[in-house]
Image: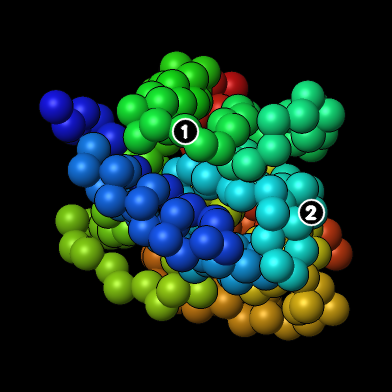
Amino acid sequence: MVDDSFKNKVILVVDDEERMARFIRLNLEHDGFQVVEAYRGMQALQSYRDSLPDLVLLDVMLPDIDGFEVLSMLREISNVPVIMLTAKGEEDDRVKGLELGADDYVTKPFSPRELVSRVRAVLRRLESSSGESPDIIEVDSRLKLDFSKREIWLNGELIKLRPTEYRLLYHLVKNTGWVLTYDQLLSRVWGYEYRDEPHYVRLYINYLRQKLEEDPANPKYILTERGVGYRFVDFKRQAEK
């Protein structure tokens, strides 16, 4: 029986064996998940930026950079849940993955039921710890964000964002109230190779303000922290003061 609570969840599957990736995809899709595949470490990082998955299934053995390095790089830019996959059963590997920030560890070969069960368990832990669904956010009476459907609503109308604009908004909103530096935004949205290009951030912040703000010159959603970066306003905290 398919659990509808996971129907819109996106899982990034990273495995250099395409047959294994397809096997995992079929079993996850059977349970209502959406699946994105990647077969190399650097491709996985780009796929993460493009698809913004709810969970990553990450094989340790990859042809360019290993899964541990991919996990370390992911943890620099995201808290997305990660389950490590490996053909090795050594305790040292399990400990290393968990110390680097993995949420769980599954050793090959595994049954489809075991894998889906682990995925569900990690996602349930995430939702229970957050206290509410992180996918649908009503910022105020004007702006509503539905990350499960990748939809942005402004005054009841659907707003079209380009992929880069969406990724930028996603990371700002997911860190509501916190300042994200230029380096953090460049790494998360564009990639490590753009870390010396702060003008990209300024340009796309301007694009977002033009589409979302009532007065782009005096923004109320996305604020500039001069010389540091940008912050999405926490309206709930403001209301409590």
Q: Secondary structure at mark 1?
A: loop
Q: Secondary structure at mark 2?
A: helix
Instruction: Work out how far the residue at label 1 is from the one at label 2, CA to CA, in angstroms.
Output: 23 Å
The answer to whether 135 is drawn above or below residue 204 in the figure is above
Q: Residue at x 74, y 69 (%)?
A: 64
Nearest-to-viewer mark from 1 and 2 = 1
| Left or right: where 167 falls relative to 86 | left
Does residue 220 appear anywhere in the picture?
Answer: no
| Left or right: where 45 falls relative to 10 | right
Give x and y (percent) for residue 71: 71, 48
Which mark is on residue 53? none
Q: Residue at x 62, y 67 (%)?
A: 40
The answer to whether 222 is drawn above or below residue 129 in the figure is below
Give x and y (percent) for residue 108: 55, 37
- The residue beneath circle 2 is 69
- The amino acid beneath tag 1 is Phe
Which mark is on residue 110? 1
Q: Residue at x 37, y 58 (%)?
A: 22
